[in-house]
Image (cartoon, rainbow, N blue to C red):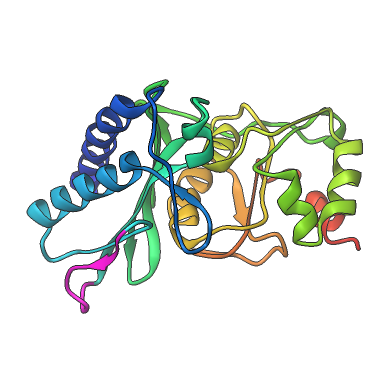
């Protein structure tokens, strides 16, 4: 495991340097088939990490948001990459985007990394180990009352689109503070105790894979928005654990 952790850090740092070279510069923004934006920074960062994995672990498979699957079909270990999670933030010069890196064993995430290139923060969670932020152990908050909780989310529009709008409004009315610090950064905030609840109503596998090891290794809880335990899924709710069931009851109330 330590070899994989060290390598995940190497992937994060090297791809981060590349991405920062594009941050704050004029960008040629293209749109994929699903209408989501993509830039050269996304594509080149993933290509860099893919090459590094193929050299170091040719027996492993790689799945990336931008270039799909490569490597042996029979591989039991699979790296899953999202080179820029929060591309819209990146495009607009907002520094809260991140890189998500996960290692899966037979489809189950055993290692996750969330890297914020602009701040240099690197959160790593691994099965059987404490989650660390730049090498130092972190833990979720001890908040037990929703009236004292900080809630973060990726998109209020997506909450309404997916049918959670009224319930989300109710949750906002019960929480102390609600802010749109979303994408992987929001889940990092929960894992490090800086926020208590993070909601993501629409996700792809590469958005989810890195989250579980990071959140659970910090003492938190991660499910989908219906409360189902997930390794990979289409939505995610991260909390400090204490508030999880209460939040699920609210957002599924209607």
Q: Is residue 248 left or right of residue 104?
A: right
Q: Is residue 160 at least partly visible in the picture?
A: yes
The dominant secondary structure in magenta is loop
* Quadrant of the image occupied by residue 122: top left
- Say above or below: 56 vs 61: above
**70 inside magenta stretch:** yes
In which quadrant will I find the C terminus? bottom right
- Of residues 119 and 48, the one nearer the viewer is 48
* Quadrant of the image occupied by residue 152: top right
- Of residues 43 and 100, the one nearer the viewer is 43
Q: Is residue 174 left or right of residue 106?
A: right
Q: Residue at x 58, y 32 (%)?
A: 189
Residue interval drawn in magenta: 67-75
Q: Is residue 80 left or right of residue 174?
A: left
Location of residue 92 in the rendering, given as x and y in whole percent from the top left corner: 52, 29
Q: Residue at x 83, y 37 (%)?
A: 146
- Of residues 71 and 198, the one nearer the viewer is 71
- Of residues 75 and 229, the one nearer the viewer is 75
Location of residue 64 in the rendering, given as x and y in whole percent from the top left corner: 33, 58
Location of residue 76 in the rendering, given as x and y in whole percent from the top left corner: 25, 71
- Say above or below: 230 vs 87: below
């Amino acid at each position: 495991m330590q070899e994989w952790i060290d390598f995940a850090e190497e992937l994060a740092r090297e791809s981060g340097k590349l991405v920062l070279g594009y941050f704050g510069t004029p960008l040629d923004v293209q749109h994929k088939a699903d209408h989501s934006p993509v830039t050269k920074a996304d594509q080149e960062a993933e290509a860099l990490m893919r090459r590094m994995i193929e050299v170091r672990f040719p027996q492993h498979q790689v799945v990336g948001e931008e270039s799909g699957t490569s490597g042996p079909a029979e591989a039991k270990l699979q790296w899953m990459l999202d080179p820029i999670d929060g591309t819209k933030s990146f495009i607009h010069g907002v520094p809260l985007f991140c890189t998500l890196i996960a290692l899966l064993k037979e489809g189950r995430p055993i290692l996750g990394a969330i890297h914020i290139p602009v701040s240099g923060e690197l959160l790593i969670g691994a099965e059987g180990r404490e989650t660390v932020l730049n090498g130092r152990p972190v833990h979720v908050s001890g908040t037990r009352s929703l009236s004292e909780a900080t809630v973060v989310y990726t998109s209020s529009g997506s909450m309404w689109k997916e049918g959670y709008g009224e319930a989300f409004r109710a949750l906002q009315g019960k929480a102390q503070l609600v802010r749109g610090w979303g994408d992987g950064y929001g889940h990092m905030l929960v894992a490090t105790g800086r926020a208590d609840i993070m909601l993501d109503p629409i996700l792809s596998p590469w958005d989810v894979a890195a989250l579980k090891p990071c959140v659970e290794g910090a003492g938190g809880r991660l499910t989908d928005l219906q409360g189902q335990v997930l390794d990979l899924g289409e939505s995610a709710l991260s909390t400090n654990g204490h508030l999880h069931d209460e939040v699920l009851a609210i957002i599924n109330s209607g």
